[in-house]
Image (spheres, rainbow, N blue to C red):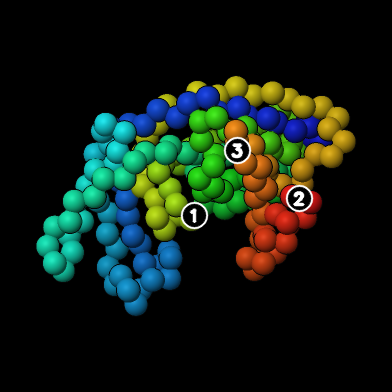
Amino acid sequence: EPGDLLAVDIHDVECDAQGFFGHWPFVYHLQDWLPEPVTRLVDIRDGHVVHTLQTAAGPHPVRVPVRPMIGCIGTAPHLEVPTAATAGRFGGNLDTPEIGPGATVYLPVAAPGGLLYLGDCHPYQGDGEVSGCEMRAVVTLSVRVLKGVPAAPACPRVETPTSLVTVGVGSPAEAGQWQAVREMI
């Protein structure tokens, strides 16, 4: 119910055998560096993403260790109809690398039923979508409904075995930063 908090315990994110990465200059405002969009399929095997980058010096093989994570996770806002491309107080396209196996994500509930959704899984991701790869995945999780939490977070919060993460979302970016700092305090 509105006012509750969902605790989403992520037990496993099983990587598919194939994924893709893309660099789309118009999305990341990198047209001066990457004039044309690039999308490449990659193999995911033996705990690594494996692909070959074409460089000016020739092919360059790359092996990146997998650290699977969920890019989009959230509940429905009260009156909005967000797309999976946005994020806000109730989660969304957070692309936070800590949201993976062993993490618990806390999400405020505003709509009856909560309406939890997730997707946009990655075999690895740096800080931000620019350095990520996408894949299909099988996610194993459990959800707890926390009622009457006196200090419920106003934005998503993530607990891992080693970290506490607050996720602020806003425009300009400083607004998100201020929200995250306030929630951490």
What is the secondary structure assignment of the residue under circle 1? Answer: loop
Q: Residues within 10 Å of mark 1 (few under 14, many from 20)?
A: few
Residue 166, percent from left and from top: 67, 48
Q: Amino acid at mark 3?
A: Thr
Image quarter hosting the N terminus = top right
Evaluate whether residue 127 shows in this view. yes
Q: CA distance from mark 1 to mark 3?
A: 17 Å
Q: Earlier in the sequence, mark 2 or mark 1?
A: 1
Q: Earlier in the sequence, mark 1 or mark 3?
A: 1
* Residue at point 74%, 36% (across, down): 109
Q: Circle 1 sits on which residue?
A: 127
Residue type highlighted by circle 1: Asp
34 or 12: which is nearer to us?
12
Judging from the image, what secondary structure is the residue with disc 2 in? Answer: helix
Label disc, if present, on residue 183 of the rendered structure: 2
**Residue at image point 69% right, 38% down:** 107
Left or right of 149, for residue 60: left
- The reply to whether dot 2 and dot 1 touch (C-beta < 8 Å) is no
Q: CA distance from mark 2 to mark 1?
A: 20 Å
For the residue carrying disc 2, how many other residues have a C-alpha within 10 Å: few (<14), some (14-19), or many (20+)?
A: some
Q: CA distance from mark 3 to mark 2?
A: 18 Å
Q: Is 61 left or right of 18, judged from the image as shown?
A: left
Question: Marks 1 and 3: which is nearer the front?
Answer: 3
Residue bearing the label numbered 3: 162
Q: Secondary structure at mark 3?
A: loop
Q: Position of residue 26 (x, y in %)?
A: 39, 67
**Relative to 46, is 89 on the left or the right?**
right
The reply to whether residue 80 is visible in this rendering is no
The amino acid at mark 2 is Glu
Marks 1 and 3 close (CB-CB < 8 Å): no
